[in-house]
Structures are given as C-alpha cells and as structure tokens.
Image (cartoon, rainbow, N blue to C red):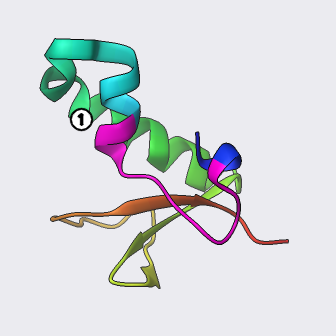
Amino acid sequence: MATARGPESSICPSDAARAVGGQEWRDLMDDARDCARELARAGQVEITQRGEVLDPDAQWRGPVRIRIVRR
C-alpha cells in the first residue's frame, strides 16, 4: 500500500488493518504495527511520527505513518 502511494505520501497502519480485516480491523492494529516494524527493520519502509523517522525497535505511542524508503 505504501508503494502505491509513493515516496511523497504515506499510509496509516489502520489503512492496512482495514484492507485485511474489514469490520474487524481494530483487532489487527497490533499486527499492522508489528508488520510495519518488520518492514522498517528490513529497510523497506520508514515509520514516521510528526514527520520524524522513528526507530522500529524503540517504544513509541500515538499515531504513526508508514512510507516507502526514499532512494
């Protein structure tokens, strides 16, 4: 989904959870964030909050965005 949006845009983990889970998307939020962390560790995406790139291994809370890595 982040690839489809391109490097100048991003998605919310809830976008991915909704795409997979439909009406039960809230149950998938932890999984969506975990998947984002894995993709960030692999260098495929960046997780951002208020425009700052987050460490995927750090403890963070609140709304985040996911974007593909700018190359």
Q: Position of residue 6 (x, y in %)?
A: 70, 58
Whether residue 14 is in magenta: the answer is yes
Q: Residue at left 36%, top 35%?
A: 32
Give x and y (percent) for residue 36: 47, 45
Q: Give the quarter of the image for residue 52.
A: bottom left
Query: Which amino acid, by three-letter code, is at mark 1?
Result: Asp
For label 1, the residue is 30
Which is nearer the eye, 46 or 17? 17
Q: Quadrant of the C terminus?
A: bottom right
Residue at the (58%, 55%) spot, across then down: 40
SS at mark 1?
helix
Q: Is residue 68 left or right of residue 35?
A: right
- Look at 32% across and 29% down and name the residue there: 17
Q: Is residue 13 left or right of residue 36?
A: left
Question: In the rendered image of this protein, does residue 50 appear above or below residue 41?
Answer: below
Would you place residue 30 above or below residue 18 in this image? below
In this rendering, the count of numbered labels is: 1
Task: Determine which quarter of the picture holds residue 29.
Answer: top left
The magenta stretch spans which residues? Answer: 5-15
Specify the principal SS of the magenta part: loop
State the residue lying farthest toward the right.
Answer: 71
Residue 21, image x, y percentages: 29, 15
Horizontal side, residue 62 vs residue 28: left or right: left
Identify the image quadrant of the N terminus.
top right
Which quadrant of the figure has residue 45? bottom right
Residue 69 is inside the magenta segment: no
